[in-house]
Amino acid sequence: MKKQRGKLTDIAFLSITASTAFSIIAISLGIFIILFKESLLAINKFGFIGFIFSTEWDPVKEIFGAAPALIGTLITSFFALLLAVPIAIGIAIFITEIAPSFLKGIIGTAIELLAAIPSIIYGMWGLFTLAPIMSQNIEPFLQSTVGKLPLLGKLFEGTPLGVDLFTASVILSIMIIPFTASIARESFNLTPSVLKESAYAIGATKWEVVKDVVLPYSKLGVLGGVGLSLGRALGETMAVAFVLGNLNQIPSSLFDAAATVTVKLANEFTEADKDIYLSSLYYLALLLFIMSFTILALAKVFLLKAERK
Amino acid sequence: MILKKRKITSSIALFVCFLTALWGIFWLSFIIIDVLRHGITAITPSLFFNDPAPPGEEGGGLRNAFIGHLLITIFATLIGVPIGVLGGTFLAEYGRKYNISKVISTLADIMVSVPAIIIGAFIYAIIVKPLGHFSGWAGSIALGIIMIPTVLRTTENMLSLIPWTLREAAFALGAPYYKVIIQVVYRGAATGILTGIILAIARVTGEAAPLLFTAFNNNYFSLDMSQPIASLTVTIFQYAMGPYEEWHAQAWGAALMITVFILFATITGRLLIKRRYKD
């Protein structure tokens, strides 16, 4: 009798835990379906190609195009990665290969804390502290040096206001350093010490061991970390919302104000008074969801492959 | 000669790696010191005990936002933690042999990093729009959903660390599986699960994006979760973007409180896990 009751409770517990586990699938699918359903109106009106290549965003005339927001998202994420990845790999090398053991923990935690600071704090700090420094010192300096170069100089034209793509990318890059760094660290640690020792034994210097043994061995894992960082950068909202200006234009220089998908959502979602306006915003959200989901899934595949090795 | 050149190259490259570590630490200290510097002067009793005053008037505070934020976070925890812990239990125990569990784990890993603002838009469509108004509940559910994958994955990992022989010993005494899980496995993994919960709470405390169109904002003191409710993060956004000096000061004060709480929680979580799994 008692045993039977135990069995029944067991089945009940099993079903509860199973249904909560399956809620993850339900939520992911639910998000996709709901975003799709809400954007149907805009999908039918503007189509796919028509939406992502159109630059117009006019709530009065009810014409909406995603190009400026998508380009803003891609540019900020790209430059953030360009800045963050080499630094994150350097940090991972420093922690795993160079730092004395008492420093490893401290520096490791410090870098991870960069990920713990909320994005709204980054945004506020960016607006009140970093943006003025950018507009008064760093951006004029860049204009008078790199800005003089042919072609590359084009990127640094315009009045340096501090509220622009450049500042946003720098802040984003700081925010995503810890994601690449911590995964790169783990992958570096997976390199078998026999491999490293044999390289040392034939007379390789420490840097040569890192460059020719550790990095090639762990490249899949590092790539996974970069993907994770990119996924984060694409979806970052508040930090960028403070320092980008939400200006609907195709930027021609890094010192231009711009918009990203997330900034548009954050600023205009509650103002959208017409169905087609709201639906276009949902269309943007759907595109963002698909982009970040795909990149995060790819990153995960790389990481799983790296683990299996 | 060549050897010397290689040695110099190596030293330079390693020095550059050292500089990158400094770069990271530089920004961390810059941000924390800056938040401290601006925030500390704004920490006054009126910040905690008064409600917002009209711009230009002295003595306004953010009592409504502190209480609102607390409420939203508590209910988010009540939603996210049970689902996360139980889900993680399924993946590590009953479901560990099925392929679907691996799929769910992977999906959860992806969902951890999905943009928070997307969750906000999702909740807006399924709760705010049908009800016709913003509400504290919608905010809590959005944050709860963000917590689920994090808690689920840490719980799964922590349960998997419990040696299988421990479970077998309990089975041998005739205990049914649920009793083994609750009385043996959970007890062994308690610290780890708690750490996961603390880190998840720390993460959602700083979220602003999913609250923008769920809980929205409220300039008045309110305990009613079925109505729009103020939160610190949304208030920071509104105040920092606003034109008034007093608003900026209060936003810094709120930013300082949030940063201190999150850093404290994160470091506590890390210390807990380090002490538990020293070896």
Image (cartoon, rainbow, N blue to C red):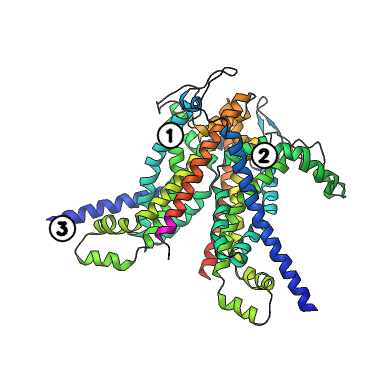
Residue type at numbered disc 1 = Leu
> Label 2: which residue?
A69
To which chain does the residue with label 1 belong? B
User: Does the magenta portion include B263?
Assistant: no
Q: Are marks 3 and 1 in contact (CB under 8 Å)?
A: no
In the rendered structure, the answer to whether residue A155 lies left or right of residue A290 reads right
To which chain does the residue with label 2 belong? A
Classify 10 Å Cα crowding around label 1: few (below 14), some (14-19), many (20 and above): some
Q: Which mark is residue B70?
A: 1
Q: Is residue A103 visible?
A: yes
Q: What stretch of residues is rendered in magenta?
A: B272-279
Whole-percent x, y for residue A83 in the image: 69, 52
Classify 10 Å Cα crowding around label 3: few (below 14), some (14-19), many (20 and above): few
**Residue A57: quadrant of the picture:** top right
Front position in the image: B29 or A302: B29
Are labels 2 and 1 on one chain?
no
